[in-house]
Amino acid sequence: VLCNAADTNPSALVRQVADILLAKDLKGLEPAPAKETAKSSGAPLSAEQMAALAGIYWNRDDDDFHKILVKDGKLQINIGGDEFHTLKPAGETSFHVADVPWGDQVEIRFLPANSENPRRLEQSFGGEKADIFESAMTFTPSGTELGAYVGDYVSEDIDPVYRIVLQDGNLRLTRLKKKAETLRPAVRDVFTGDIGTVRFTRDSRQRISGLVLNAGRIRNFRFEKRVD
């Protein structure tokens, strides 16, 4: 997938293209024998087991987040924006992504916490090296806390102003020639959206002073908050 917009999510676009191009071929594949299916699939999880896995998981290297949640009685993964996928058991602690042609290529494993590490999520595709996400404390800000992030943010490198507004109880990012998008809280001072990860910074007095954007090929792009 080629695109000159740096904040494009190429992985999501590739999956959408694959869904379209491979749908006909995959539909015609003969189903695996019942014995093989039973071997590769795990038992359904109880509501308590699913709830124990739910939460925010953080890949510190890429400043990327996955949210695991229970929705409509199913364990689901939100990998950014409005992209939600159901997870289907593939073993005692491993899962594949359901209802998409590429889903069985994705393996997601949950590792319990130990004396050195919090609970972790490992994600690999096609048997490649896994990306590691650590369980993080979920941030549920109040309206007052959200209000502290509201303002205009500017960068020396680009002209457009990134404006953060509070609308219907959610932070929204508005910018020139782009649709406003919702920013969802991940951990303290960090929000995610279709644009990527927005990390707010604070000054020595703990006031919001700016933000750092990580979006696709854009890394550590800094903005300062305008002072009224």
Image (cartoon, rainbow, N blue to C red):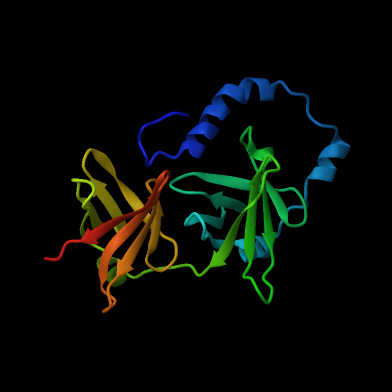
User: Where is the C terminus found, in terms of image quarters?
Assistant: bottom left
Residue at 78%, 50% (x, y): give it.
42
- Judge by depth and name the residue closer to the eye, 224 or 90: 224
Q: Picture quarter containing residue 111? A: bottom right
Residue at 49%, 44% (x, y): give it.
83
Q: Is residue 59 above or below residue 30?
A: below
**Residue 103 as seen in the image, left or right of residue 92:** left
Q: How far across and how far down the image is residue 209, in percent?
A: 25, 67
Q: How far across and how far down the image is residue 93, in percent?
A: 73, 57
Q: How far across and how far down the image is residue 1, in percent?
A: 47, 29
Residue at 50%, 56% (x, y): give it.
65
- Judge by depth and name the residue closer to the eye, 124 or 83: 124
Residue 8 in sight: yes
Q: Is residue 15 above or below residue 171?
A: above
Residue at the far left: name it.
Answer: 228
**Residue 167 as seen in the image, left or right of residue 217:** left
Residue at the far front: name it.
Answer: 157
- Judge by depth and name the residue closer to the eye, 33 or 226: 226
Q: How far across and how far down the image is residue 59, in percent?
A: 53, 58
Residue at the far right: name it.
Answer: 35
**Residue 62 as seen in the image, left or right of residue 46:** left
